Image: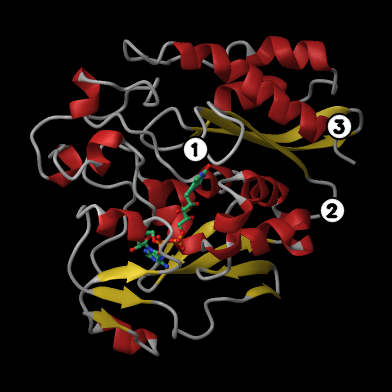
Amino acid sequence: MIHFPRTLSELGALEGEFRAASTDLSERRRHGISGGSLIDLRDLPGLDQLLLEGPRLNIGAKVTVQAVADSPLVRLHHPALAASAGALATPAIRAVATVGGNLTQRVRCWYYRSPELTCLKKGGSTCLARAGDHLYHACFDRGACVAPHASTLAMALLLGDALVITTRRSLTMAEFLGDGSDARRENRLEAGELVTGLSLPVVQAGLRAGYHRAISRARAEWPLVEAAAQLRVEGGVLRQVQLALGGVATVPFRLPAVEAKLEGLPPDLDPIRAVLSGASTGASPLPMTAYKLDLLAPTLFYAVRVAVEAQ
Ligand SMILES: Cc1cc2nc3c(=O)[nH]c(=O)nc-3n(C[C@H](O)[C@H](O)[C@H](O)COP(=O)(O)OP(=O)(O)OC[C@H]3O[C@@H](n4cnc5c(N)ncnc54)[C@H](O)[C@@H]3O)c2cc1C
């Protein structure tokens, strides 16, 4: 059965899986990984707005990824989000995929996506990828499941002070994601809790950003490693440096120790490269994912370089 609620209170009384643009959901349903009733978000009003409201930029959960990428407001107040949104998936996916769906899409692990297999996420007792083929999986081993988080926007939103707004509360991005140790889920949403949007602080002009991904084919693929950087160049040095990595752990994460070492450096590429060479500290690769460590520093460097050179 498919429900089409017209208000949030109607939605609150329903049970089922939310459906936005269905670019992730329809594949899971086709393979029997997801089933049961659907709650289609199509008729819910007000969630497709991207608005400057006082000191906050509010982005509704149904705003498309491409609209985020194209928005001059997002480019000004959260350039890393705009850059990341413009680089993920394909133009066709970005045109329809929503912010809410992107943040809450499920992992791309082939064991999870196989209708024949019961991995930890589907109630099984073991992570099949850990003992099996985990070529595209974590190199920071932080939980029983080793599938990397799939959301590029979630990684970018770790920069800045973005809030995820739901029908029940406001969460920082770190609160929304959790620490990645719960193998069954990729975020801390409760059953029936809808993401209604994002709220971003308005910032002064001059924030610069870069996004880069290492990828196994030219396009239309999730990244092996992805990185976002956001910073300012003020008084001839780097300020407010923020870095995030995705594709390498069950949740994307910030790099506070590396950020601190970049803070105050002149925007010269050689010292930046030297600092970033330590980015894989703390990694715990699986037998097949050690290659990702070689991708980390160059991917981060590229993102930082784009940010430093941005005008
Ligand atoms: C070839 C290809 C490459 C891709 N590469 C990338 C990539 O590099 N990075 C990346 O991030 N993504 C990538 N994607 C995934 C794509 O971005 C997601 O499928 C899309 O963002 C999901 O959005 P949607 O609106 O279609 O969500 P849906 O498919 O409708 O929903 C996805 C999930 O989110 C839940 N959901 C939807 N909206 C809400 C809400 N408001 N609140 C709570 N739960 C909700 C649904 O119940 C469902 O479980 C790629 C996809 C393809 C096909």
Left or right: 130 with respect to 53?
Answer: left
Which sits earlier in the primary sequence, circle 1 or circle 3?
1
Of all residues, the one furthest to the left in this rendering is: 125
Residue at the spot of label 2:
205
- Colouring scheme applied when the structure was drawn: secondary structure
Q: What secondary structure is found at the residue carrying circle 2?
A: loop
Q: Nearer the viewer, residue 19 or 196?
A: 19
Name the residue located 52 percent from the left edge and 61 percent from the top edge: 97
Residue 83 seen anywhere in this rendered image of the structure: yes
Residue at the spot of label 1:
222
How far across and how far down the image is residue 143, in percent? 26, 30
Mark 1 CB lies closer than 8 A to ligand 1: yes
Q: CA distance from mark 1 to mark 3?
A: 26 Å
User: Few, some or many C-alpha atoms within 10 Å of disc 1 (few <14, some 14-19, many ≥20)?
Assistant: many
Q: What secondary structure is found at the residue carrying circle 3?
A: helix
Residue 171 seen anywhere in this rendered image of the structure: no
Report the amino acid beneath label 3.
Answer: Glu
Name the residue located 53 percent from the left edge and 44 percent from the top edge: 152
Name the quarter where the C terminus is drawn: top right
